[in-house]
Image (cartoon, rainbow, N blue to C red):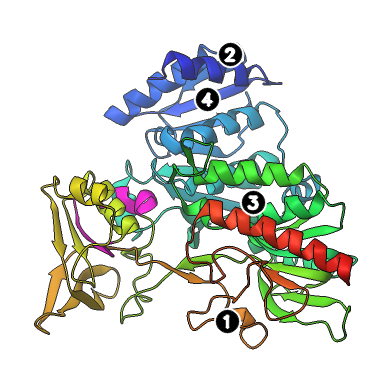
Amino acid sequence: MLDNNLKAQLKAYLERLQRPVELVASLDDSKGAAELKELLLEIKELSDKITVVENNDLDVRKPSFLITNPGVDTGLRFAGVPLGHEFTSLVLALLQVGGHPSKESAELLEQVRNIDTPLNFETYYSLSCHNCPDVVQALNLMSVLNPKITHTAIDGGLFQKEVEDREIMGVPTVFINGERFGQGRMELAEIVAKVDTGAAAREAEKISAKQAFDVLIVGGGPAGAAAAIYAARKGIRTGIAADRIGGQMLDTVDIENFISVNKTEGPKLSAAMENHVRDYEVDIMGQQRAAKLIPAATEGGLIEVQTESGATLKAKTVILSTGARWRNMNVPGEDQYRTKGVTYCPHCDGPLFKGKDVAVIGGGNSGIEAAIDLAGLVRHVTVLEFAGELKADAVLQKKLATLPNVTVILNAQTTEVNGDGKKVTGITYKDRGTDEIKQIALEGIFVQIGLLPNTDWLKGTVELTRFGEIAINAKGETSLPGVFAAGDCTNVPFKQIIIAAGAGATAALSAFDHLIRH
């Protein structure tokens, strides 16, 4: 099941095991169970610290396996065969159960250990989901650290009956003690903050007590990372406050146009950028979403940034790099059926619609790429494009034309998402050529119609364009002295990772120049 190269890499990792690890398999006579047994036996052969036992009498999902120490129940279970994007989660789970330390902060790890409430987590993932591993790995670690916490990572493609019964139409979806807990990408700190209700207030108090920064960067995408590195290299006090480090890159699968990197994935590039930032003395404050910008009261005074958690940060200069988010259709039914058939990530959620009819809204590159990917999974894809022609690159349109289960409808204005109260059942659109109203029966809608800047919190403070973008000049300067901006939240004409990174560097150099002159 594992090729020789992968076995060699895994064997090297397993040499880090500090204590015995036992894999307890619960199997049935399914094809998935046979594949799981093969995988576990291959892993066993790579380390003398790993043993495999079979216990089919347990009242658990089958096929599944527990990763534990002999005589101990860690509560860490995989239901399914964790390959694809989840293979990394499997490797980390083996190492952590085997005593290899986590790289998370000691403070956060101690916070997990101190949780005193029994928590039973279940996470539904798909093997093609690039957002799922962060959630799975965070909850696995929590179950390793705290005996009152258990976690089962469930392959939604293998346990489709559960997915349908629980009305899961997007991954990762997490349940806690049988109740829906959350959906989408979540990091360990975010999960802990949700279950430890006093954590956010304590963190806000701690952040508010920090001394003023020379430059405070708001946002942790490529623009924010580049700005942090360039600022820190100047030897000035630098901080980053961000909802999540990585920004939109975390939601990007294949990246093939970042110069000098032939091909990578968004989460990998995000991790590399974060590691680069951490090489310098940068104060990184995660899980902090900006809520208000207060300009300096006097020339040369301090600028304040307030966060949704209640923290207040002060700085001599500020760089705004809050990025952008997926644009909504803003039609009736979209909000009601979000995560119930309306989704924004074909790579993550596509496997949940296997054998079903779906629509892709948008005929640009992202929309056509989504249609091509989905065509290999679902029964039929309908592409709805508002304009009279597709806007995607010619090479993508050529590929799309070869797919027999894809239909393209042009001049289509989506007017409503239809549903039965629980899930999507179809979509209504207007033919812009004839004004005729038409309906399509389907079970999934993938929205791919561009981005909106994350600047709502800045209205009334800095100058924004009519599109809500921060207006900047060639130096990254905004309408406020000492406040700079970079990346997809600004009025730069092209929204690209490499352009955002360059703009972040520009903003940092301009902020340094401002500090020198003032």
* Crowd rating for badge 3 (residues with CA inside 10 Å; few <14, some 14–19, many 20+): some
Single out the mark in the foreground, 1 or 4: 1
Whether residue 240 is visible, yes or no, is no
Q: Position of residue 411 (x, y in %)?
A: 17, 73
**In the rendered structure, which amino acid carries the disc numbered 1?**
Leu
SS of the residue under disc 3: helix
The residue depicted at 59 percent of the width and 47 percent of the height is: 270
Q: Which residue is mark 1?
A: 464
Say above or below: 240 vs 464: above
Badge 1 or badge 3: first in the primary sequence: 3
> Is 225 placed left or right of 131 in the picture?
right
Badge 1 or badge 4: first in the primary sequence: 4
Which label was assigned to residue 47?
A: 2
| Along the line of sight, the residue nearer the viewer: 213 or 82 | 213
Q: Which residue is mark 3?
A: 188
Question: Dividing the image into 4 quarters, which one contains the N terminus?
Answer: top left
* Crowd rating for badge 4 (residues with CA inside 10 Å; few <14, some 14–19, many 20+): many
* Crowd rating for badge 1 (residues with CA inside 10 Å; few <14, some 14–19, many 20+): many
Magenta residues, start to end: 346-363
**In the rendered structure, which amino acid carries the disc numbered 3?**
Leu
Question: Distance between the Cα atoms at labels 2 and 1?
Answer: 59 Å
Question: Distance between the Cα atoms at labels 1 and 3?
Answer: 34 Å
Question: Distance between the Cα atoms at labels 3 and 2?
Answer: 29 Å
Q: Position of residue 160 (x, y in %)?
A: 30, 48
**In the rendered structure, which amino acid carries the disc numbered 2?**
Ser
Which label was assigned to residue 23?
A: 4
> Is 85 placed left or right of 398 in the picture?
right
Question: Distance between the Cα atoms at labels 2 and 4?
Answer: 12 Å
Badge 3 or badge 4: first in the primary sequence: 4
The residue depicted at 28 percent of the width and 47 percent of the height is: 373
Badge 2 or badge 1: first in the primary sequence: 2
**In the rendered structure, which amino acid carries the disc numbered 4?**
Leu
